[in-house]
């Protein structure tokens, strides 16, 4: 008996070491929660659900989605930062929203505090209700010279709001902003005729275009956008020749200071997922294209996005303090 007891004591450290090593290698040991800080049905939500389904296959655990709209996405994003930094809580959003939160005084976190995993790029499309009297972008621009046309968006600083500001800055035409709690509610309001137009992301309007509930006037790009089941959407440069390309990248944005093993596992699952047929089909169906931006490349792209968007919103009076205060260089 004494011999067996002594042997157990000698073996105990080795058993504990092996158990610890096993736990270390098993990340994630429990389900992952993704906070989508917008209403269901928007671009962030749609991308998150499709991407999560593919990443689950590599990670081997359930990835659940929690919608927490409010504050132009800042409320749900703060909830992610308030969670333990164990890599189990992520956010799903657009790069164009993430880069604005600090400068808008919505969050203390900078865009530099995220490990960003961007999977899909989607351009903004100018749409009107199917029964709208505006048949072309020229018609809409003429109306905007005569009155304050209402433009819906997912909220202040959101991708749709940024697009409207790019439109104003490049055409000199004014508008009346009508913010909603996400892209889906903004699109629904436009379909119902509550507002006259929307400059939302292609991913969020394609279904309503196919259903003939919306009419697309132009894509905010220099090339036409082909949407299966709807047709070709002309580029805005047909009317405004020097108009810049406007759109957002969607994916997962996670606190940078999570454990190294978690970041490594997430990166592996992400790179596998973005190359899957499911993600490629999702992007094609939504008038978007697949990208795979993470790590140092993502940091570089986020810096460039912050410069372009935050200085635009500052010059428009939406951001009160100079972006220089937050270390954001002028483009």
Image (cartoon, rainbow, N blue to C red):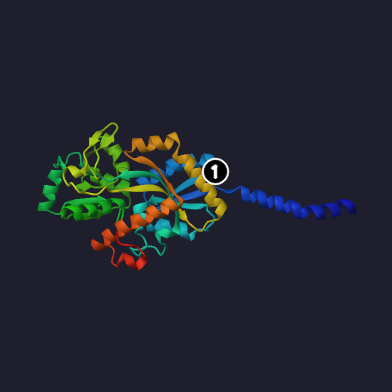
Q: Please give the name of the residue rendered at 18% of the width and 46% of the height, measured from the top-left corner.
A: 241
Residue lying at the far left of the rendered structure: 146
**Which quadrant of the figure contains the C terminus?**
bottom left
Residue 141 spot, x, y in % from top left = 14, 48
Q: Please give the name of the residue rendered at 15% of the width and 41% of the height, measured from the top-left corner.
A: 136
Query: Quadrant location of residue 223?
Result: top left
Residue 237 visible, this angle: yes
Between 296 and 89, the one lying in front of the other is: 296
Horizontal placement of 161 versus 147: left or right?
A: right
| Residue indicated by mark 1 | 59
Residue 195 spot, x, y in % from top left = 21, 49
Label 1 element class = helix
Relative to 117, does residue 58 appear above or below in the rendering? above
Q: Please give the name of the residue rendered at 48% of the width and 46% of the height, measured from the top-left corner.
A: 64
Q: Please give the name of the residue rendered at 39% of the width and 51% of the height, measured from the top-left corner.
A: 93
Residue 275 spot, x, y in % from top left = 45, 38
């Amino acid at each position: 008996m004494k011999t067996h007891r002594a042997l157990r004591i000698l073996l105990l450290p080795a058993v504990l070491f092996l158990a610890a090593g096993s736990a270390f290698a098993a990340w994630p040991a429990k389900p992952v929660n993704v906070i989508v800080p917008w209403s269901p049905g928007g671009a962030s939500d749609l991308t998150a659900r499709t991407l999560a389904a593919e990443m689950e296959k590599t990670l081997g655990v359930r990835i659940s989605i929690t919608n927490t709209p409010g504050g132009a996405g800042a409320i749900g994003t703060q909830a992610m930062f308030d969670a333990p930094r164990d890599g189990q809580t992520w956010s799903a959003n657009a790069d164009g929203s993430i880069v604005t939160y600090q400068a808008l005084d919505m969050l203390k976190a900078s865009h530099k505090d995220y490990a960003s995993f961007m999977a899909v790029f989607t351009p903004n499309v100018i749409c009107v209700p199917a029964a709208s009297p505006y048949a072309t972008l020229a018609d809409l621009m003429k109306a905007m010279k005569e009155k304050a046309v209402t433009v819906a968006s997912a909220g202040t600083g959101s991708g749709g709001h940024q697009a409207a500001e790019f439109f104003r800055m490049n055409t000199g035409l004014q508008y009346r902003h009508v913010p909603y709690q996400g892209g889906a509610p903004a699109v629904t309001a436009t379909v119902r005729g509550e507002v006259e137009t929307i400059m939302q992301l292609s991913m969020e309007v394609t279904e309503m275009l196919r259903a003939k509930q919306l009419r697309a006037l132009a894509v905010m790009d220099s090339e036409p956008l082909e949407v299966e089941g709807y047709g070709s959407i002309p580029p805005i440069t047909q009317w405004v020749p020097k108009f810049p390309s406007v759109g957002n990248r969607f994916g997962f944005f996670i606190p940078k200071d999570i454990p190294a093993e978690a970041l490594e596992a997430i990166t592996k699952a992400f790179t596998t997922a973005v190359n899957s047929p499911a993600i490629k089909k999702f992007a094609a169906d939504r008038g978007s294209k697949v990208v795979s931006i993470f790590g140092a490349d993502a940091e570089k792209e986020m810096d460039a996005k912050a410069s372009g968007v935050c200085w635009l919103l500052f010059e428009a009076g939406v951001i009160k303090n100079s972006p220089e205060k937050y270390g954001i260089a002028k483009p």
